[in-house]
């Protein structure tokens, strides 16, 4: 770095370019303006005159100065000027760079790397040995001190990790290889306290001076608080409260922001001033919540700002235990499980079966509808004790149970028998619900008026009855009671889960209540449970985060034992999603923030750390000067233009904008789209444009004048028939020369095959194939009536030669149920001038089956690209200019009938070309069926 | 902008309408042989009655005026006053330089020159003079106006920047009007005037210039090029050339004026921004005086 007074230059050699400025001055000065061409008859009088002043109209000196100043500023800017650069006197001795590499270091990682690189380069310049310690917890053994330049590659490859920064445990061991001399330490810190940081700092200060580079931005972290209702906590070091984005796949499967959560009021941590925590409630509909894959602090890109959603946030597994459903449909509505199933299925995973089976699947919630506990009780009690949520519903069986007060796993003691309200033999009306308590699990739900309870089980009065009641009737008798049992809880609905005792199960409130209750169930947490045979002892990483909070594949990470996983993210188990069997668990990097303090170390403050970089300012000023220059130049030109000499002014002003204009013109010229459009516009034949406008039929020019004339007349006859009989009104037929014409405007091409036809060029075949692919149809007509009698289309050699390069699918004779047979007329045969020869179209797909009741298969999802035949249709269609048929067809009346059929085939074909498989639709099936039936009867 | 014959004629009619018929000044008419409107105050071929004289031997019987002779015994011959028509030759330059105009608000020099030539021709024809374009036989009458218009309008570009009137078409006792910009090499003018004065031909030179050519309003770097593209001049400071150009123009005009005076001709200038009637009036005065 070059230091000039208070100014330092990072790359001083660029300043050498300043020497070029005087040359630039001379060039700019000497550059004459381009002369303007003026026609003038009086030139003869000018001949031989010499300019009074040799160089005319120089750039004004101040404009020149402006430009030179701008250039000089640009050169200075690129030399990397720094105002008052910090030059800390480098102390001799080895350098240790401690680079915090936990998730908290991810914001501004590039800046940290740059700072470390600068320090290493300085050390390299001084020839001091250096070592780089990344605090990602993967450093084992003593650090190697080497020439600082050797460390740069490792530094550049370093990336933050998705766990907290960890220092090696033993400083003495790590620094065992330290060379002689006082150890200079540069600690690029992430600002968070870690386990043995204070210890390290103390020892490092003992070994030499320690410089600490604190993080530039205040840090934020997000943690998941898995309680009854899982919620997030936002930890910040300042007063900011950015929104939390809930991200998950949308219905199309694309990850997107599903919701924005707003943090609540801040509570300042008592332990450390300045750290604020804000609760963030995940108050979302269950359907939405189940889709969320991650929560992220808006605008923060580090692993600590991401909370991956796992089972704790997502679907609960609910086991339903009840009487098996009756098979009959009507009785399903009587089954309590039916209502539970309908209420829970959208938001939870349901497991049904006997109590033992359900317990084996390790559910989060077990719901028992009117079940009495018998021998399974110890196992179930153990499950509840470990954190399960047991929800029980009352019912006639419980009401009739004689020793009901002794029934285990109930939140309250029950009286046997229960009570009926509002029955035929009782006083009073059915009871409604009382409003829910403001602090209970049902807070915020409103009890609808129409919910009425007609029967319930009654609780024995007890001192804690009121505390255990979470919903009650309007006469304060408990309706739902809850009691904790061990780490779990037991909930009892004092009514049935079907509509026998109340209409609660058929109200929307029932669904909401169950959702709330299920959401309050604690998800079984492997970290707090000993690995049992039911639990997976190892967790497979499915998806892990990098330090920036971006998801990546798990790669070859080893499975993690459950007890290891309980320790949180660390080396070998980065933050991410881990799966064991059906269960998925998220390890999140975010932790509550603890501010680090640095006694005895020199803390670089952000203000004076690198000096003020002037590059941006200089470039801005230079740009401003250049803009001013452009403005002045324009003004200068305008000044020269006096009235009556607009042309002169235009000439000079044009120079200024010429470059921009040229650039724009160049861009337009290079833009492929416009170029293609121009090409197309050039190539398009007006005749083809007309064909597109008028849906004109087209035929291929074969080169044989007679055949071409027949084609033209034939298509003309067909066009007339179409015009008279259908809503297709084609214009005059169009002759198409395959070698030169663009086919993209056409839909139908009649191609008579002749012997002497020249084979089209490869380009023409390209166009033909494009034509076929884009829905065009070619009617190949070998016109020989299959005289050779070989069965297939003849004039085989010519046709094969012509059609070989075309992309033609496998062919077959027209099946009886092909759309061609009914596109407009119902046809059996496709006669032209000849009759009874097979016509070939694209083969129907193998395995096409007719739908029952429909006389044809649904064959033609696409339109066949070719129709090949030998019936010489054009000759049958051909009319002369007076509209009379040109060629005789067949003999007598039958012949005319054949001609009529030929026209009908033509019309069907054109309809088929224009409407595709429209007729395959079922719309006309009834009418067609009717007609087919009557035709069968007729003969 | 170029005139069609009918157009040219209509515009020339308008311009010429303000002037009475021009009869060329009758100097040296005595020597005239060709008949015309200029009475020679002596008997000779002509149209107007001059005198009856007794028939002398040698008079043919056809020449005897029988009506006059019937009143007396002698035979009289009816003499007519000898008359001559002055012939005027007009030449408008067809050089490419004439196609110049400095601004859209004014016609090209060529159009102006043709207009002036046509108007002058019509005034002369109305005066009974015989008029022609240089190189063509002079004729009189209204039909000649049509022919003039035709030839003027269809006059081809010479291709060169400047052209010269045909020297060999000069005939004695003609009046010649040369309309051009006289910006090219003026050597031919001197020759022409020398020959004309030798033949007793008088006339006028009219220099038609565009205002730009008179003022030279150019500045900065300009590449001047003649309209045919054959001559060009490159300058870095056109404004600095203005004085020199104007001096040269004045010099050229002096040359022309002196030449004209020496040969008994007249020299006038006209710029296309002015009304054509000015130039026409000047020609009228010069030729009629």
Image (cartoon, helix red, strand yellow):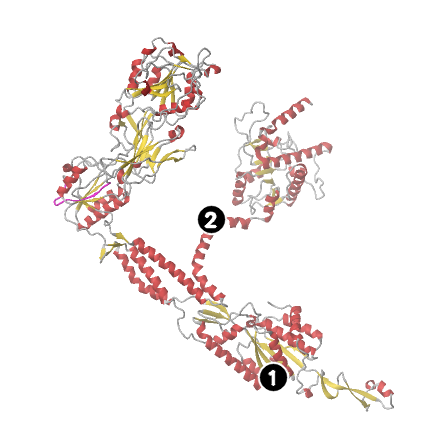
Residue at image position (31%, 21%) is A467
Residue B258 magenta: no
Picture quadrant of residue A5: bottom left
In the rendered image, is residue A838 in sight?
Answer: no
> Is the residue at mark 1 from the same chain as the one at mark 2?
no
Q: In the figure, A330 relative to B207: above or below?
A: above
Please, which chain is the residue tagged with disc 1 on?
Answer: B
Please, which chain is the residue tagged with disc 2 on?
Answer: A
Picture quadrant of residue B100: bottom right
Q: CA distance from mark 1 to mark 2?
A: 72 Å
Crowding around mark 2 (Cα neighbors within 10 Å: few <14, some 14 to 19, many 20+) is: few
- Tell whether B130 sits left or right of A1: right
Q: Secondary structure at mark 2?
A: helix
View extreme (left): residue: A180
Residue B196, which numbered label? 1
Q: Measured from the top left, where is residue A496 in percent x and y? A: 41, 16
Question: What type of secondary structure mainly makes up the magenta span?
Answer: loop
Q: Secondary structure at mark 1?
A: helix
Q: Measured from the top left, where is residue B237 in percent x and y? A: 43, 71
Query: Disc 2 designates what residue?
Result: A672
In magenta, the rendered stretch is: A177-190
Residue A268, which numbered label? none
Marks 1 and 2: CB-CB under 8 Å? Answer: no
Residue A189 magenta: yes
Quarter in which the C terminus of chain A is drawn = top right
Crowding around mark 1 (Cα neighbors within 10 Å: few <14, some 14 to 19, many 20+) is: many
- Tell whether A797 sits left or right of A570: right
């Amino acid at each position: 770095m070059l230091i000039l007074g208070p100014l330092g230059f990072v790359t001083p050699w660029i300043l050498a370019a300043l020497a070029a400025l005087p040359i630039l001055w001379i060039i700019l000065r000497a550059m004459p303006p381009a002369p303007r061409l003026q026609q003038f008859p009086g030139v003869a009088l000018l001949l031989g005159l010499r300019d009074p002043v040799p160089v005319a109209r120089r750039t004004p000196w101040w404009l020149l100065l402006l430009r030179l100043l701008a250039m000089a500023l640009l050169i200075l800017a690129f030399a990397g000027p720094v105002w008052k650069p910090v030059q800390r006197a480098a102390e001799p001795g080895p350098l240790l760079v401690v680079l915090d590499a936990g998730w908290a270091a991810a914001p501004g990682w590039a800046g940290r790397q740059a700072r470390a690189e600068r320090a290493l380069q300085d050390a390299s310049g001084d020839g001091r040995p250096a070592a780089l310690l990344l605090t990602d917890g993967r450093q084992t053994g003593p650090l190697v001190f080497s020439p600082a330049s050797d460390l740069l590659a490792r530094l550049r490859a370093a990336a933050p990790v998705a766990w907290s920064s960890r220092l090696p445990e033993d400083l003495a061991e790590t620094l065992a290889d330290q060379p002689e001399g006082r150890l200079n330490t540069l600690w690029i810190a992430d600002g968070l306290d870690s386990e043995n940081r204070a210890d390290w700092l103390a020892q490092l200060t003992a070994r030499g001076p320690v410089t600490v580079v604190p993080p530039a931005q205040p840090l934020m972290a997000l943690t998941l608080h898995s309680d009854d209702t899982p919620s997030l906590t936002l930890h910040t070091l300042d007063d900011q409260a950015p929104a939390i984005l809930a991200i998950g796949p949308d219905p199309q499967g694309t990850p997107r922001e599903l919701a924005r959560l707003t943090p609540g009021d801040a509570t300042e941590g008592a332990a450390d001033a300045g750290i604020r925590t804000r609760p963030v409630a995940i108050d979302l509909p269950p359907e939405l919540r189940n889709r969320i894959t991650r929560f992220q602090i808006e605008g923060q890109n580090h692993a600590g700002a991401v909370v991956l959603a796992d089972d704790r946030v997502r679907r609960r597994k609910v086991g339903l235990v009840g009487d098996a459903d009756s098979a009959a449909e009507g009785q399903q509505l009587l089954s309590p499980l039916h209502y539970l199933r309908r209420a829970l299925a959208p938001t939870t995973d349901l497991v049904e079966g006997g109590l033992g089976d359900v317990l084996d699947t390790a559910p989060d919630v077990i719901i028992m509808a009117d079940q009495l506990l018998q021998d399974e009780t110890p196992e179930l009690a153990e499950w509840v004790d470990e954190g399960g949520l047991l929800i029980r519903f009352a019912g006639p069986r419980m009401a009739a149970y004689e020793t009901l007060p002794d029934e285990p796993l109930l939140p309250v003691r029950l009286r046997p028998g229960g009570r009926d309200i509002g029955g035929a033999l009782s006083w009073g009306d059915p009871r409604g619900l009382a409003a829910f308590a403001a602090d209970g699990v049902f807070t915020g739900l409103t009890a609808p008026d129409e919910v009425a309870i007609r029967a319930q089980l009654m609780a024995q009065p007890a001192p804690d009855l009121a505390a255990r009641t979470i919903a009650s009737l309007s006469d304060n008798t408990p309706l739902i009671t809850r009691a904790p049992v061990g780490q779990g809880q037991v909930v009892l609905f004092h009514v049935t889960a079907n509509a026998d005792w109340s209409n609660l199960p058929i109200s929307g409130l029932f669904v909401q209540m169950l959702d709330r209750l299920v959401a309050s169930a604690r998800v079984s947490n492997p970290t707090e449970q000993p690995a049992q045979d039911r639990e997976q002892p190892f967790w497979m990483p499915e998806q892990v985060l990098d330090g920036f909070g971006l998801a990546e594949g798990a790669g070859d990470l080893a499975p993690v034992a459950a007890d290891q996983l309980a320790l949180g993210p660390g080396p070998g188990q980065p933050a991410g999603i881990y799966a064991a069997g059906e269960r998925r668990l998220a390890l999140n990097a975010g932790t509550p923030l603890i501010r680090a303090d640095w006694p005895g170390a020199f803390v670089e403050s952000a203000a004076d750390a690198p000096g003020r970089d002037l590059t941006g300012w200089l470039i801005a000023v230079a740009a401003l000067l250049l803009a001013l220059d452009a403005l002045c130049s324009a003004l200068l030109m305008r000044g020269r233009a006096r009235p009556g000499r607009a042309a002169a002014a235009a000439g000079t002003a044009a120079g200024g904008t010429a470059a921009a204009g040229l650039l724009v013109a160049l861009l337009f010229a290079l833009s492929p789209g416009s170029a293609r459009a121009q090409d197309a516009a050039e190539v398009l034949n007006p005749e083809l444009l007309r064909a597109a406008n008028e849906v004109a039929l087209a035929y291929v020019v074969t080169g044989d004048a007679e055949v071409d004339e027949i084609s033209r007349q034939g298509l003309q006859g067909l066009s007339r028939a179409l015009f008279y009989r259908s809503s297709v009104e084609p214009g005059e037929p169009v002759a198409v020369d395959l070698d030169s014409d663009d086919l993209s405007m056409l839909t139908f091409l009649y191609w008579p095959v002749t012997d002497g036809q020249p084979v089209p060029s490869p380009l023409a075949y390209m166009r033909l194939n494009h034509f076929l692919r884009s829905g065009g149809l070619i009617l190949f007509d070998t016109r020989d009536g299959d005289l050779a009698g070989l069965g297939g289309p003849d004039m085989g050699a010519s046709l094969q030669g012509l059609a070989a390069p075309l992309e033609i699918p496998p062919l077959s004779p027209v099946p009886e149920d092909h759309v061609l047979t009914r596109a407009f007329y119902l046809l059996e045969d496709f006669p032209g001038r000849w009759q009874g020869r097979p016509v070939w179209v694209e083969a129907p797909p193998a395995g096409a089956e007719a739908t029952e009741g429909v006389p044809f298969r649904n064959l033609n999802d696409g339109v066949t690209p070719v129709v090949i035949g030998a019936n010489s249709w054009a000759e049958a269609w051909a009319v002369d200019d007076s509209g009379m048929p040109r060629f005789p067809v067949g003999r007598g009346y039958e012949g005319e009938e054949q001609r009529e059929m030929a026209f009908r085939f033509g019309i069907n074909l054109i309809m088929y070309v224009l409407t595709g498989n429209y007729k395959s639709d079922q719309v006309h099936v009834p009418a067609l069926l009717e007609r087919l039936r009557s035709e069968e009867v007729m003969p | 902008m170029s005139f069609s014959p009918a157009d040219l004629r209509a515009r020339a009619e308008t311009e010429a309408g303000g002037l009475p018929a021009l009869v060329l000044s009758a100097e040296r008419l005595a020597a005239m042989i060709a008949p015309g409107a200029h009475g020679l105050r002596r008997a000779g071929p002509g149209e107007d009655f001059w005198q009856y004289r007794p028939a002398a031997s040698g008079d043919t019987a056809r020449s005897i005026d029988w009506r006059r002779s019937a009143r007396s015994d002698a035979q009289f011959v009816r003499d007519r006053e000898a008359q001559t028509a002055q012939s005027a030759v007009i030449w408008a330059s067809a050089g490419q330089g004439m196609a110049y105009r400095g601004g859209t608000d004014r016609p090209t020099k060529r159009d102006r020159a043709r207009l002036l030539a046509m108007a002058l021709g019509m005034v002369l024809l109305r005066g009974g003079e015989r008029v022609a374009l240089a190189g063509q036989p002079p004729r009189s009458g209204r039909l000649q106006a049509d022919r003039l218009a035709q030839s003027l309008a269809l006059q081809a570009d010479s291709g060169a920047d400047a052209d010269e009137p045909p020297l060999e078409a000069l005939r004695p006792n003609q009046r010649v009007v040369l309309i051009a910009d006289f910006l090219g090499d003026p050597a031919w003018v001197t020759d022409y005037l020398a020959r004309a004065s030798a033949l007793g031909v008088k006339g006028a030179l009219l220099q038609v210039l565009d205002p730009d050519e008179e003022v030279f309003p150019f500045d900065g770097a300009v590449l001047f090029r003649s309209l045919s593209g054959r001559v060009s001049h490159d300058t870095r400071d056109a404004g600095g050339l203005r004085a020199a150009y104007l001096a040269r123009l004045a010099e050229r005009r002096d040359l022309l004026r002196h030449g004209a005076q020496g040969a008994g001709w007249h020299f006038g200038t006209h710029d296309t921004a002015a009304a054509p009637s000015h130039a026409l009036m000047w020609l009228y005065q010069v030729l009629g005086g």
